[in-house]
Image: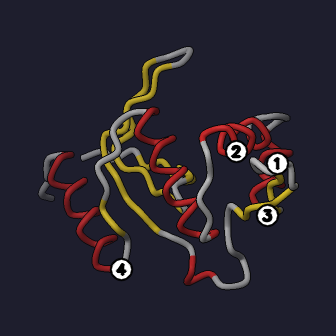
Amino acid sequence: MTTQSEQSLENNLIQQLVGLGYEQVDVTDDKQLVANFQVQLQRLNQVELTDHEFTQILNFINKGNIFNRAKVLRDRVPYVDADGETRTVQLLDGLNVESNIMQVTQQVRMEGRYKTRYDVTLLINGLPLVQIELKR
């Protein structure tokens, strides 16, 4: 049995995903992750969000337990625009799956309670929904 390095395994997986239509992006920390999410959310919903509007959306999706957060993925997320109007955005398009933006990145580092590094992360509309840890 032959083995390959984790880096080689990681690169091969990324190339396979790119071949399937994933866009490879360079997102390596939580600040870049949030910035990419804002761009992809605007792209999916064809809207320009101010920083204040985007912060409202982040606050809405970051509350509750894991079960409630998972439910939010299927719903529309409300926010109040600069004119005081209530608007909504969708996080995932379940009706037109092909309109979702599929991205892949590698070596994302997160600092919170622990320092964590993920080998490969799949982003759907900028949301890190799948973390893959590879072993030789």
Give the residue type at disc 4.
Leu
Answer whether labels 1 and 4 touch (C-beta < 8 Å): no
How far across and how far down the image is residue 86, in percent?
87, 55
Q: Residue beneath label 3, please?
A: 74
Per the image, the residue denoted by label 1 is 80
Sequence order check: which comes first, mark 2 or mark 1? 2
Residue 99: percent from left, percent from top: 57, 80
The nearer-to-camera label among 1 and 4 is 1
Q: Residues within 10 Å of mark 2 (few under 14, many from 20)?
A: some
Q: Which badge, 4 or 2, comes first in the chain's sequence?
A: 4
Q: CA distance from mark 4 to mark 3?
A: 24 Å
| Other-residue count near label 1 (Cα within 10 Å), few / some / many at <14 / 14–19 / ≥20 | some
Percent across and percent down for residue 54 are: 65, 44
Please indicate whether residue 18 sits to the left or right of residue 94 in the image.
Answer: left
The residue identified by callout 4 is 20
Instruction: Mark 4 or mark 3: name the one nearer the start of the chain.
Output: 4
* Residue that extends furthest to the top in the rendered view of this protein: 113
Tell me residue 133's x, y (percent). Answer: 39, 44
**Which quadrant holds residue 67?**
top right
Label of residue 53 in the image: 2
The CA distance from mark 2 to mark 1 is 7 Å
Q: Secondary structure at mark 2?
A: helix
Pointers 1 and 3 in contact (C-beta within 8 Å): no
At mark 3, the secondary structure is helix
- Nearer the camera: disc 1 or disc 3: 1
